[in-house]
Image: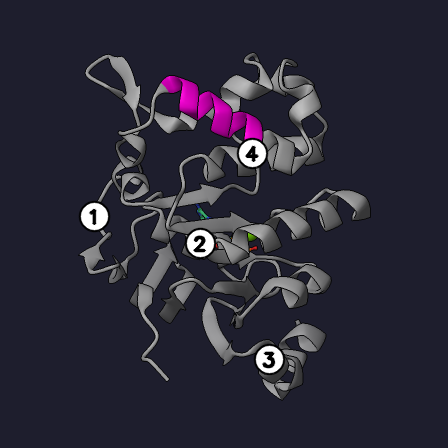
Amino acid sequence: EATPNIILHAADVHKNFGGLRALSDIDLQIEEGKTHAIIGPNGAGKSTLLNVIIGRIPPSSGAVVFDGTVLTGKAPHEINQLGISRVFQTPEIFPDLPVLHNVMAPAFARRDGAFRVNLLRSIDSERQIRQEAEDILDDIGLHGRRGDHAGSLSRGDKRRLELAMCLIQRPRLLLLDEPTAGMSRHDTNTTIELLRKIKSSGMTKVIIEHDMHVVFSLADRISVLAQGRIIASGLPQEIKEDPRVQQAYLGG
Ligand code: ADP
Ligand code: MG
């Protein structure tokens, strides 16, 4: 068997907020092409870890390396341009713009006071981007709403719109922070199907999720975070049977 390619490595990451140790001794390795779930109780440090990876929060010590490039110290937009996109726990959309334009916008980057096609997409014309945005909206079940203001969408639809805004960037690594939070069971299932489809495209994903149904339907690997530490990491079946994990959930 070939050695797996580690596309992202968070090495010896610590993060303190004042006296609070939000992350301690984090060593996380993400294999290229895989879906890696991070689970753990509320307040475990999951969102903080994602924020450290995307450059929103500087670690107190340690480093994050993406495909041979040290991310630590880089600005969020630089990290994004290296091919990392994140779906936030709270959707960040343009409420006054039509849904279609929301999806198209991230394919452009603001440089020198003008909008240019995002570096990752430099060969594509605006017409190609519009077509791809329409295709993604079709996949995501929002094509019928493409002319409506994004602000008029339901909470669940806003979260799917935000996922579409990530997908158009064609990231190499997609980070999802509780992508089905606040969704109905029906919308959750639609989102799982969509994430499965993305999985077959070979995009690497890190997903934070509370819903164990979602985790076990999607994850190739699972890491469990509790009180800022990774207490277990392995295949879904190993995690299910791990007494430390059961204790962290039952006790936590
Ligand atoms: P999770 O996403 O696993 O629920 P978080 O990463 O949001 O957990 O939070 C981990 C801990 O760090 C919590 O105790 C939280 O209150 C604290 N925390 C998160 N962000 C900040 C911040 N910006 N300033 C101070 N404390 C924070
Ligand atoms: Mg969180």
How far separated are the C-alphas under marks 1 and 4?
33 Å
Quarter of the rendering occupied by the N terminus: bottom left
Q: Earlier in the sequence, mark 3 or mark 2?
A: 2
- Amino acid type of the residue that numbered disc 3 sits on in the rendered structure: Ile
Name the residue tied to disc 3: 239
| Dot 1: element | loop
* Disc 2 crowd, CA 10 A, few/some/many (<14, 14-19, 20+): some
Q: Are marks 2 and 1 in contact (CB under 8 Å)?
A: no
Q: Which of marks 2 and 1 is nearer the N terminus?
A: 1
Mark number, residue 203 = 2
Name the residue tied to disc 1: 73
| Dot 3: element | helix
Identity of the residue furthest to the right in this view: 185
Mark number, residue 136 = 4
Extent of the magenta region: 126-135
Front: mark 3 or 4: 4
Q: In this view, does 7 lie above or below 183?
A: below
